[in-house]
Amino acid sequence: MSFKVWSQLNREAGEELTPNFGFRPWNLLSEEDKYKIWQYLEFNFFNKNIQKNYNNEWSDEEDGTYYEFQGESEERKFKRKRILLSILAMNHNHKAKSYAKQYLENPTFNHACSDFYRIFMKESENVVLELLSMYAKFTISERKEEIIFKRDEESDKDYQERLEKWRWIPFDEFTERLNDVFVDFGLNVFLTRQGFVPRQEPKISEQIYEPVLKNLSNPRWKEVSRLIADVFNDYRKNTEAGYSSCITNTVSAIQAFLQILVYGKTGKGEISELTIRAQKDNLIPNDFFTQTIFKNIESIFARERQETGLAHPKKEYANDKNALMVLNLAMVFIQHSLKI
């Protein structure tokens, strides 16, 4: 059945019901928009029977305290732990700012929740994204040391793939919800397994960035992932030096990716020779079309690193367009190499 609702049939209705905000930073959101976003995401942080009272304190509806230990569900324990760890990390990593001041003065869970909400609503984009990054990071660690049983008929490879996927479930579920809300409000970032990255057009994000970054979360690509994380951090600085560093680290990530692909570890080989070797060994596609694309991409990487990166004296400083072009090409390069 292909029944379509009115907004799918009428363009004006669609634009009215789902406005296009473009790509905007968190700092341009109104307080009303931030509160709406909070309402959509609140269940990911707190449980439905938790409310904020008129004294700006977080409490349980029944007895005025947050969770009881006895009879507490696993889900509630995980949410409690994520909140506490996120607030602890915010204070520990940024001592001079002490963003969670209430918890610092009186370390109770109620104060941790109150600080979490206040940061979300009142602080700048950098602080909010840091908090959400911390929260997301702690969803990953929940199943890091846990295992699931191997099925009798299951190969070691299939089991490892299923185990890896299972360990990422809490993070992936949180990411899916967060990104769905962020897209509707036109926010210019989205969350991936490598952290927050610049938001692209939906097809680029969904068909290139997300599958590539999921694959790079495999321990095999740990060094590449570390460089990619630096790339996104550099890009978000929104400075000429940040964009130049972004380009340098992007090219380094491609080089590291090819070194691991060809030799199993980083440390040896330039991009051009590594690409030739990888094609000869059938590690990456080797048809004429692919050869032409890779050759062009290599020349772009070399030119941008020479002219706007930090590895050599610059002819000009990089801007956001240079950096994003190189970053997008790198994602396409890796995607095509891994045949995702």
Image (cartoon, helix red, strand yellow):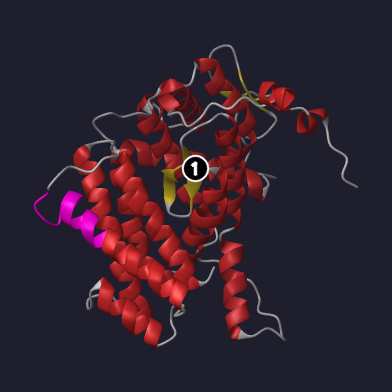
The residue lying toward the viewer, choosing from 111 and 22, is 22
From the viewer's side, name the closer residue of 162 and 93. Answer: 162
| Residue 240 x %, y % | 21, 39
Where is residue 329 drawn, in percent x and y? 39, 57
Identified at 27% across, 50% down, the residue is: 246
Occupied quadrant, residue 50? top right
- What kind of element bears circle 1? strand
Q: Residue furthest top?
A: 54
x then y, percent, for residue 57: 54, 20
**Taking 62 as reference, is 24 left or right?**
left
Please name the residue that numbered disc 1 is placed on: 190
- On whether residue 307 falls in the magenta region, the answer is yes
Total marks in image? 1
**152 horizontally vs 295: left or right:** right
Q: Judge left or right: residue 168 versus residue 86.
A: right
In front here: 321 or 235?
A: 321
Q: Residue at x 36, y 46 (%)?
A: 324
Along the viewing direction, whichever of 188 and 145 lies nearer the viewer: 188
Q: Which residue lies furthest to the left in this view?
A: 313
Above-or-below relation of 295 to 33: below
The percent coordinates of residue 317 (x first, y second) are 18, 42
Q: Is residue 112 magenta?
A: no
Find residue 39 and report its image quarter: top right
Judged left or right of residue 187, residue 230 is left
Identity, as a three-letter code, of the amino acid under mark 1:
Phe
Instruction: Report the magenta residues as a range.
Output: 301-314
Residue placed at 40% from the left, 74% from the top?
291
Q: Can residue 202 be seen?
A: yes
Number of other residues with Cα within 10 Å of mark 1, as a class: few under 14, some 14 to 19, many 20 or more: many
User: Is the C terminus in the top left, top right, bottom left or bottom right quadrant?
Assistant: bottom right
Identify the residue shown where x is 62% and y is 49%: 173
Is residue 78 shown to the viewer in this render?
Answer: no
